[in-house]
Amino acid sequence: MLTKKQLNDIHSLQQICEETGNIKLKLNWDTLKSRADEENDYFHYDNSGNLLGYLALYNFGGPVELCGMVHPNHRRKGIFSSLFNEAVKQLAQARKLLINAPASSQSAEGYIKSLPCTYSFSEYQMKRHKSKKIGTANSEVTMRQAVSSDLVFINHLDTACFDIPKDEAEVFNKKIFACKNERTFIIEHKSEKAGKIRIQTEKDAAWIYGFAVDPSFQGKGIGRGALTNVVNLQHSKGISWVHLEVAAENDHALSLYKSCGFEPYGTQDYYEYDLNTLKV
């Protein structure tokens, strides 16, 4: 796990980079605070112990995602390239690598142009406050916490809805079941399994991940009913903010989230790295 000092150093560097560039980095703090012992974090310190560069790898059950940052006063010195070269050994078995950068970051855009990357998609970061009104719950849509016997269905949804290979879905969801601050729920429609959703909470905020409705159940208002249930439940627990992310081109989901009181506050661009160029 990352030490308290490492987390503090990452947070301090993030603040500097965001304030200087007027950007919002996506470092997935909920994940960083619960890292396993796998090597996914890479640091570059100067001789005085100041963190000048940081790179993180994330595996959310699909493509490996990469995000990083370098102190504004120490860019163009090869720091990020050095960190990337260190991380290469962890990418040997990756099926796909996506590099994430804030859409408004000119420095990130300039650096990515030098890499063997192609633009893949953009993603909106959205949140809603408990003061926002939301509709009443659909009594035909209920939720229960997932149990191990639901894993086959959960893996099926990841494959059917997110195009995640079966073997990768199995490994990821087995790992998620062991997380203490993240829970997977099964969405049921008239007592039939219809979808799933993951909720991660920390202090006064909650994050929604892996929200999927089985294709055979779509178009029946189940997604809206489940989202309403989740939002109402989290706010009833004292959670002030509920966060989620959605692909910019997913008009249907974007419309649903906006109608439920979610507002975009940042945009992240994703670029697919040509793994064939790696020398491991």
Image (cartoon, helix red, strand yellow):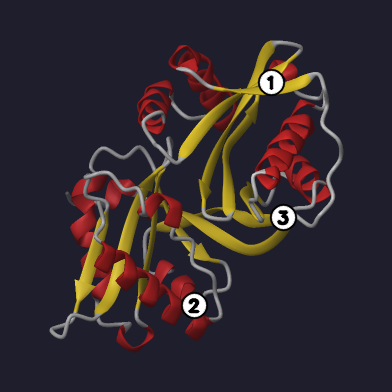
Q: Dot 1, crowdedness within 10 Å: few (<14), some or many (≥20)?
A: few
Residue placed most toward the observer, 140 or 79: 140
**How far apart in space, not on screen, are marks 2 and 1 (Cα)?**
39 Å
Instruction: Give the number of the disc on residue 202.
Output: none
> What residue is shown with label 2?
18
Q: Dot 2, crowdedness within 10 Å: few (<14), some or many (≥20)?
A: some
Residue at point 76% right, 37% down?
228
The secondary element bearing badge 2 is classed as helix
Instruction: Give the number of the disc on residue 128.
Output: 3
The secondary element bearing badge 3 is classed as strand
Q: Are marks 2 and 1 in contact (CB under 8 Å)?
A: no
On screen, residue 100 versus residue 232, left or right, reads left
On screen, residue 97 versus residue 138, left or right, reads left
The amino acid type found where label 1 is placed reads Pro
> What residue is shown with label 1?
215
Above or below residue 129? Residue 75 is below
Pinpoint residue 48: horizontal percent, then vertical percent: 16, 85
Which tag, 3 or 1, sits closer to the chain's start?
Answer: 3
